[in-house]
Amino acid sequence: MPIYTAHDRLPIAAAASPGEPVLLLSHATGFCKEVWGPVAAALPGFGLVAVDQRGHGDSGTPPPPFDWWDLGRDLVTAAAEAGAPHPIGVGHSSGAAALLMAEVLDPGRFSALVLIEPIVFPPPYRRYEDLPLAVAAERRRASFPSRLAILEAFRGRGIFAGWVDEAVEAYVDGGFREIGGEWILKCRPAVEAEWYRSATTHGVWDRLGEVACPAVVVGGAGSSTHPASLLQQQADLLGDGRVEMVPGSTHFVPMEDPEAVARLVRELAR
């Protein structure tokens, strides 16, 4: 497993495999690089660099408050250290926002972008201490007695209701570590909550026009967070953006319909 050194010396973990063209995969808040497994399985022959966000998976955790622009800096570092000068970026939620930040910070870094419901909203840009997502994250159960107990708690329930089995299992295997017989969340509840509280501070909305590479803004037709009108606004602000809606999916498109994401990647690669 490659470990990249971020600008602030934080270790950033990744999973990499050879092939062409190269995809740089960036997950959502609270998850891990392994959740891209079903998408990767649908793209044989592609090179892959899947990155754990700071505070997630096998990457280090910085002291709060968190700066979302660091997520973009980490992707620039990962692409450079992986020897992938112009990958196709594929990101979900905060991971999609991170890709946009990376392209703003290092113009021309990506040949194209697949942006699945980016956490990029218009102003005001401020923290929300009582954000429901943050409150819920802090209350999240952080340990289980076994892998089976996690699967029984997650599979077919809550946000996992529409996930394919392979995605649930990948999240359990990558998002938890076994310590003394307990399965413990790698992304601690307080860390996840802090990322949510700062999610509306970064101001990337005002810089979307700086992103010139081809970009597909993807939404789940059943999403409760990203209506088609918002996705269209994002795409219109990009230099070369368009919208693609995925029927039967919610905010969690990559975990619910990995083949739809793979299809969009193949279209861009052509």
Image (cartoon, rainbow, N blue to C red):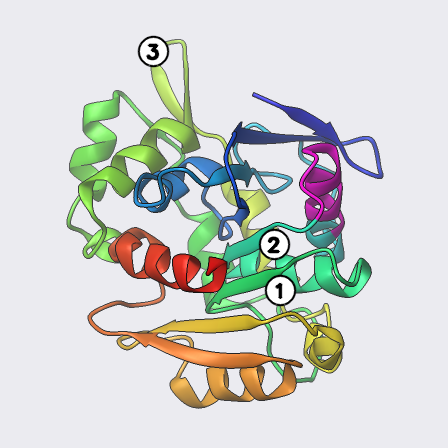
Identified by mark 2, the residue type is Trp
Residues in magenta? 73-85
- Measured in 3D between alpha carbons, the distance from the residue under mark 3 to the one under mark 1, in whole angstroms, is 34 Å
Q: Is residue 36 left or right of residue 53?
A: left
Identified by mark 1, the residue type is Ala
Marks 1 and 2 close (CB-CB < 8 Å)? yes
Q: Which residue is mark 3?
A: 181
Residue 162's disc number: none
Q: Considering only vertical position in the picture, is 221 above or below 75?
A: below
Q: Which residue is mark 2?
A: 195
Residue found at the very far front of the displayed protein: 270
Q: Position of residue 202 (x, y in %)?
A: 72, 68
Q: Which residue is mark 1?
A: 199
Q: Considering only vertical position in the picture, is 203 above or below 75?
A: below
Identified by mark 3, the residue type is Gly
Q: Quadrant of residue 241?
A: bottom right
The kind of secondary structure element at disc 1 is loop
